Image: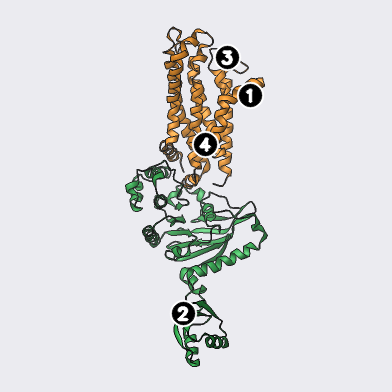
Chain colours: A orange, B green
Amino acid sequence: MSVAPVIHSEWIKIRSVRASWGSLLAVLVVTVAVTALVFATVGEAEAEDGGDLVKGAFYPLNFAQAAAIAYGATAVSPEYREGALRVSLAAVPRRGLLYWSKAAVITLTALLVALPTTLATFLVGQSLVGEHAIGLDHPGVLRSLVGGALYLVLMTLLAAGLTFLLRSAVGTLSLLIPFVLVGSFVIGDAAGGIGVWLPDQAGNHFFREAATGRLGPWASLAVTAAWAAVALGAGWWAVRRRDA
Amino acid sequence: MTTIELTALTKEYGGTRAVDDLTCTVEPGRVTGFLGPNGAGKSTTMRLVLGLDRPTSGAATVGGRDYTTLDTPLRTVGALLDAHSAHPSRTARDHLRLLAASNRIPTGRVDEVLEETGIAPVAGRRVRTFSLGMRQRLGIAAALLGDPPVLMLDEPANGLDPEGFVWMRQLLRRLAAEGRTVLMSSHLMNETSAVADHLVVLGRGRLLADIGTTAFIDRSSAPRVQVRTSDPARLRASMAAEGHEVRETGGARWVVEGATAEEVGAVAAREGIPVLELNDVRVSLEDAYLALTSGAAQFAAASPRTTTGTREV
């Protein structure tokens, strides 16, 4: 069997289930909406308070990651409804081909949405903070645009791998969403040094003018990548080993 | 000529043998009914053939090849495992299109099978709006998609109305007549006997019979006669003298075991016993099947390894 037909098939799977492509679209829509809302109300005041302007500009990506996680989970979870995975594996019995083709389609689609998302977040936000606006040439902005998109893709893949392992979107969401929205701050603050090794902490270290903390921005992103890799590896282990 | 070959196929789930040393070949050109009570191992066997479950020992192959090594498997085996496996928020057409894409099956084929299974008018509707019968037809459409020489259908008659069942029977007969291998599982004897030329019967994962449908009936039909008489006491006495047991079945009717109508009629005439009604009773296929599978169940119930319960398949 060859890769291209399986990739094509996986793409049809995503675009034919509303929950999947809806979550993907939500990454862009929710983030830009939150950006517009936040910056139109408190954007200027926040910018006047000083602090890291790049960090402020990309703050709404905290919400984007929740949508990215939802996409990763809902792109995989249709396989675990009733006997869907059996139908998929009957069509593509080489499990590695099926698994990594799906991962590739998720990566590609997430990247295609994540790049406009980070760009739109920055542009929309900066258009609403008046004289405090920074440009694309500001230190750290281009890095944050690209790295932010990669970060969203990695969180998507983390959720996708976990969903293969847990066989349920609900399981993944109820584990990851509270974690990135609440848990990580608490654990990160309480445990001090451990914080930088949590998957979602790259965000806190990435969107800065200058590096802070023990790990630099790219090293932080590598930590997130390692988590995504572990989750995908665990998902693959589960798919390869389990009876379908 | 593509056959399904099972060789000493065994599958255990945590100490329970769902499939136990199963060896048989499903031949092309006929409809093979795959029979057994719920939990007998029929679905597990089909999953093993498709490489969805891995055998504990033994092998299942299609045309001599492991299913998972086939290049475009949907063009070799069309399978219907579960009517609910199409995602409810997909349209029927999208469900078929994504399957076709994965095996390089031309998109035109999607419309052909939609027509063939009678669901073309609802192809653009989401599967969640489908009745069980329509889902079953969609599953059969998916199985036919690759125009495969082998069809494997798990309980395809589930949810079909009588008209749908007649349609499916004709479809399976035609597919078999075209020289394809058709394996159809069911736990219902009557619907199977209406379709199948050949039977493979499982009980507790074991092969109980691999036999032509007609031969199965003949083999299982012990002679038995039903009589209505106004003098049952003399009938009983004279039949006992011939070595046959007589039982009352209600409505003043009596059954003579192990005898034919000719024998009972001759004895009654000789003894001057008034006979009001006399006819041979054929054992129904269902009775034969139940006798066979209940025997297996009793055997299995006495065996300690089944105390962990069976997996619903």
Q: Which residue in the protein does label 2 denote?
A: B280
Q: Are marks 3 and 2 on the same chain?
A: no
* SS class, disc 1: helix
- Which label was assigned to residue A211? 3
Q: What chain is tagged by disc 4?
A: A
Q: What chain is tagged by disc 2?
A: B
- Please report whichever mark, 3 or 4, sits nearer to the chain's N-terminal start: 4
Q: Are marks 3 and 1 on the same chain?
A: yes
Q: What chain is tagged by disc 3?
A: A
Percent position of residue B217, x then y: 48, 72
Residue B198 can be seen in this image: yes
Amino acid carrying label 2: it is: Asp
Q: How crowded is mark 3: few (under 14 residues within 10 Å), some or many (20 or more)?
A: some
Q: Quadrant of the N terminus of chain B?
A: bottom left
- Which label was assigned to residue B80? none
Amino acid carrying label 3: it is: Ala
- Please report whichever mark, 3 or 1, sits nearer to the chain's N-terminal start: 1
Amino acid carrying label 4: it is: Ala
Q: Are marks 3 and 4 on the same chain?
A: yes
Q: Please report contact status of discs 3 and 1: CB closer than 8 Å, yes or no.
A: no
Cα separation between marks 4 and 2: 62 Å
Percent position of residue A86, x then y: 50, 47
